Amino acid sequence: MSKFRDKLFRRIVEYAYSVPLYHRKYKEAGVTPSDIKSIYDIVKLPFITKKDVIENFPDGIIPLGYNKNEAYIASTGGSSGKPVSLFTDFYTMSQSLLLSIREGISFGFNPRKVRFANIGTHLEGRIDYVFHKAVTENAQFFRKANSYLTMNAFDPMHEIVERLDTFKPDIIYTYPVTLQHIAYLKKKGYGPHINPKLLMVSGYSLDEYTKRYVEDAFGCRIVNLYQSVEGAGDIAFECFDGTWHVNYDFYHLEAIDENMELVDYDERGHVVLTRLFGRGTPFIRYTGMDDWVTLLPETRCNCGLFTPVLKNGVEGRVSAQIILPDGRVYPAASFAIISLVLNELKTYKVTRFQIIQNKIDDIEILLVIDDDLRDVGPSVDLIFQKIKEAYEKKCGPDVRITVKEVKEIKSPPGKPLPLVISKVKPEEGYKIIEV
């Protein structure tokens, strides 16, 4: 594997050297492809930021002479600012399809027969739309006809459920919040023929309460995928043992701190992505993905895989971090202790929740209550009290905690609902940390 990764890395660095952005950066750093012998030489290369990609679009992020007529432009959602647009092509996306096939087989599914429902952002220019047009519509050579369903996650939920009920998928892939909506309607008696064997989610953190809620509704397992537009595929996936395996024959991951310094294994940092395959826009030491991770080296899992691991999975967006007055910093996933409270109370009464940091010392927790279960199990007042106490204990006396019921929590237009929103500017948090 090491020799294979070294070969891929040398090849992708040589490819990137023909891309104006990378060529200029590497020249400034005094490095050429001949200086790269193995993946360990990656530290010789400069980081590439989101700003670099945005400012050099279009011609600066593809090789000279690259045929744009045979390529596709895909854009990120811009959840942390201006979206990134990049070039991809059939060759790149079809390679990433191999990852999905391999993962499906590892979960016990025949990729030629499985009925797969993809509920994503199928809007023109977004990667779900581009991938479907370029690959899945032309991939009938390995899949039975009519075994793949695509839907937009922002269509009316009852329409989504009706189409799923008719399609009868074996696997459903979507955002956590979308799956929770479907699970809620399933619990209300809708979609009697929606009986998947596996659920997959990506895009935002999946908290333990939502996981338990969804698995109870469908009676099957739910696993996480770690994807990005820049990665062009599944960077990592969660096995049935709960381990997040990095597809390290396709990707190389690093983690850095706020000073752009590499952190050691088993330390939380900001993910840095290197994609070892593909054409179009390369991504080598790319820092623009805005995710918290804790990397572990190659680890033997009970499932039989031996790979690098994302300890605790992807812990949320860096831009969604909570910074407390005493300087403590929490990624979204580790701040969703509301899940622990709801699991302890053994209730499914809360259908949605969201944590909003309005100010450095002001946190608001919104809950949507299932009216059909309002008088079943622990009271709403007790739930509010326990959640408030848990966050007061975690945050300390200098933070005001407000827990309130709302009728609904709306997602941003064209985006899934974030678990945590922080209105605190990063520079405000950094000042506190420095003090």
Image (tube, rainbow, N blue to C red):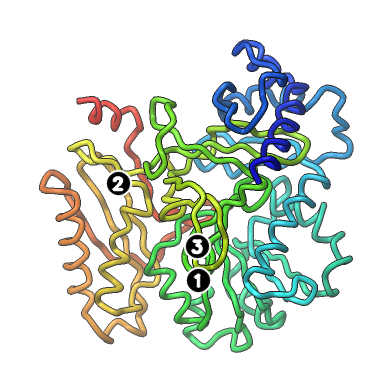
**Which comes sooner in the sequence, label 1 or label 3?**
1
**Most distant residue in the left direction:** 397
Q: How many marks?
A: 3
Secondary structure type for disc 1: helix
The kind of residue tagged 3 is Cys
The kind of residue tagged 1 is His
Q: Are marks 1 and 3 in contact (CB under 8 Å)?
A: no
What residue do we see at 78% from left, 74% from top? 147
**Which comes sooner in the sequence, label 2 or label 1?**
1
| Location of residue 59 by image quarter | top right
Q: Which residue is mark 2?
A: 357
Mark 1 or mark 3, whichever is nearer to me:
3
What residue do we see at 61% from left, 37% from top? 274
Alpha carbon distance from label 1 to label 3: 32 Å
Q: Is residue 243 left or right of residue 121?
A: left
Secondary structure type for disc 2: strand
Q: Which residue is mark 3?
A: 301
Q: Which residue is mark 1?
A: 181
Q: Is residue 389 left or right of residue 152?
A: left
* Residue 373, position as x, y percentages in the image: 33, 84
**Which comes sooner in the sequence, label 2 or label 3?**
3
Residue closer to the observer: 249 or 180 = 249
Alpha carbon distance from label 2 to label 1: 24 Å
The kind of residue tagged 2 is Gln
Q: Is residue 386 left or right of residue 263?
A: left
What residue do we see at 85% from left, 67% from top? 142
Q: Is residue 21 above or below residue 78?
A: above
